[in-house]
Structures are given as C-alpha cells and as structure tokens.
Image (cartoon, rainbow, N blue to C red):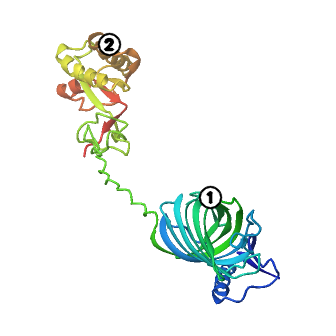
Amino acid sequence: MSITVFLSHNPIYTLFCTDQLGEIVMRKSYLAAVCAATLIPGVTFGAENFPLSYTSIGVEGSYVDAGNSRNKSAVQDNLSNFYQGGINLTHQFNPNWGLFGQVGYAEPETRNGNLDTELLQYSLGGRLHPAKFRLAGWRPFGGLGYSYTDIDVDTGGGKNEDSIYLEGGFQRMVAPRFMIEAGVRARTELEEGYVDGQYFAGVHYLFNRKFPAAPKPMAVAPREPAVVPPPVDTDGDGVIDQLDQCPNTPQGALVDSKGCPKELTKEIRETLYVEFELDKTEVRPQFFPEIENLATVLKQYPNSTILLEGHTDSTGSASYNQKLSQSRADAVMKVLINEFGIAKQRITTTGMGESQPIATNDTAEGRAQNRRVEAIVSGEYSEIIKK
C-alpha cells in the first residue's frame, strides 16, 4: 500500500510513503503528525518572492531507504526502511548560500529479529541556491553536509555513526512567511560505506526576513529657467527684427505686420508762369530761378512728366498767336533741357494761342499777364504715412 503526496500537482515532487513490508506504520503518533504535515503542500498556493536573507524553523517528514552493513549478522547496522521526522533550522545568508541544521528522530526495526530501535540523528550542512533561476515558481537547491546518528536497540546495545550526505530539491514560497520544500538525500556511512536514500518534504516558517531595498528616487536638480533675451526692435517701428522685412524704417512711420512702411499715393501738380515781352519768345533771366525750382521737383519725382502750355494776348491774328504760343512753350523746354538737365522725353509742349487769357486784354497790364507759359507737372508718388 502507498500514500502519494503531490506538490502543486507536479509528479516530480511526489513522496511515496511505502513500507517495504506492505504495512503502514501507525504505531507512533508523531509519525502520523509528520505525514500530515507533508500533505500541506498538496494545496495549491500562489508563489511568493523569496527574501534576500532569512532564518526559518520547520518540520520535515521523510522516508528512508536504509542501506545494509557488510556484516549481515549485525543488528544495529541492518535496519529496515523507515519513516523519520525532523525539526529543521536554516539560515539564508544571501540569495545563493544558506546553512541547514536538523534534528531527526525515528523508530525503525532491525532486519534481524525485527527488534525495535530508537534513532536520533543530527545533521549540519550548507546549501547552494541559484539566485534567479525558477522552475514554475520553484527554486532548486543542492547541499552537502555531515550527520551524526545514535542508534539504540530496545534489548540493549547500540551504535553511533558518522556520515556525509548530498541533497537536492526544490523550494517554493506559498505565503509571505511560509516555504515548502521537497527533495532527496543520499547519506554515506563513513565506516561501513553503505548508503541510505532519504526522500523528504517539509514546511518552514520564516522570520528575520530581508528584502531588496526600494529604489531611492533619483534627485533631479531643478532646472534653471532658460534665459530668453527680450526681442529686439532696432528701428523702433513696433515689429521685432526677426519678423521685420523692412529694416531701418523712418522714425514715426506707420508700418504693416511685416514692418514695412505704409505709403499714401498722391498726385503731383506744380504750375509755372513765365511772362514774355510783346511778340517775343526769349525767356528772361529773371524767371530762371522759378524754372530751376520746377526742375528740382522733376528730379525729386523721376516718374513725373511736365506739360508746357504757351499763351498770348489778343494782339495780332489768332493763327499768329497760336504759333507764337507754341514757340514760347518750346523756349521754356530748351531752358529745362539745356540749363537743368531734364530729359526731353519727359516734356510735352503745346500752344494755346489767345484762347485762355487770365486777365483782360484791354489794358497793358492784363495783356502782359496773358503773355505767358504755364508748366504743369503731373504724376504720382508714394508718401510714407506718419503716426
């Protein structure tokens, strides 16, 4: 008959509690308690993280496949397979290394005569754990240690044994303070050299736990606000230099969003009166300053043109006066060209004759005013609008 214990439903962690003779050992109450303890891992638990270091105390139940002494007649060295209970004390120094100690107790029978015995065993060893490797939440471990065993036979006599053991198994955290484990030990008796096989499972309670420290928040130095230089407006027109498409705008000018001056288009009109003597076409020097002023206007506005209109009084025939007025207009044109450098193509002349008097022809003064040339400058120019 057998009892099978499944750890997290994984057959690799199965403990077979089988008596070689086919009888379940129920005589001793402590053995029943140990086997019940080994059933606890059969409940499915959620895996927890292992602490970096800890100390634990726990109980262990195991089944020992006892080896045989070379001296078959010896009583103490030839024990039947048996169940053993133990109290474990461990200390995990870091994620890789731990110390294991155990006090074990069992009441096996001898193969010769089926005599009752009491077995008290002390074990001390080290354990090696991989820091990060896990198998479905289980942490593997391996160990090496020394065991001292005291065997007493009820009928008298006994024996002490020294042995070394190797072990391997798996552990799993099932709650913040509870850990389960299962594994196999091979224990070699140093004097006789026989080997006991031990299949074990246990439950541990953890204290003095230490976990990784929470990461400290990185101190971030406050950033100094970036110093942004104030926008520059070199010409003071209200539009910063980065956006100003018309730098060096005159002070006081109205500008658009691009910084360019707003301009107003105006018409140019300038009138010149040059009076002539009776029946003469020569321009008298006294009128040169006025003609020069007119030439200055023409130079200021190079796109402008000028119309010279010649006039006469009513003396003489109308056809004669027409030719005379034309000659007077041409005379003023020559002064503009020859004396002040105005281009001929900008000047137009016409004779108006006696048709447009500005004064009466009945008096000498009136007729003198009618003998004239009028200059009319025409064109357009743009003027910057001031604020």
* Residue 371 visible in this rendered orientation of the protein: no
Query: In this figure, what is the number of numbered marks?
Result: 2
The x and y percentages for residue 116 are 69, 82
Please determine whether, in this image, residue 281 is positioned above or below residue 135: above
Please determine whether, in this image, residue 182 is positioned above or below residue 194: below
In the foreground, 383 or 344: 383
* Residue matched to label 1: 133
Between label 2 and label 1, give the one nearer the viewer. 1
- 275 on left or right of 20: left
* Residue 341 visible in this rendered orientation of the protein: yes
Please determine whether, in this image, residue 281 is positioned above or below residue 98: above
SS at circle 2: helix
The x and y percentages for residue 84 are 66, 77
Residue 143: image quadrant is bottom right
Of pointers 2 and 1, the one earlier in the residue sequence: 1
Tag 2: Cα neighbours inside 10 Å, few (<14), some, or many (≥20)?
some
Q: Residue at x 71, y 61 (%)?
A: 194
* Residue matched to label 2: 337
Tag 1: Cα neighbours inside 10 Å, few (<14), some, or many (≥20)?
few
- Identified by mark 2, the residue type is Ile
The x and y percentages for residue 155 are 66, 82
SS at circle 1: loop
Q: Look at the numbered discs 2 and 1 and tell me whether their residues touch, using CB distance below 8 Å.
A: no
In which quadrant of the rendered image does the N terminus lie? bottom right
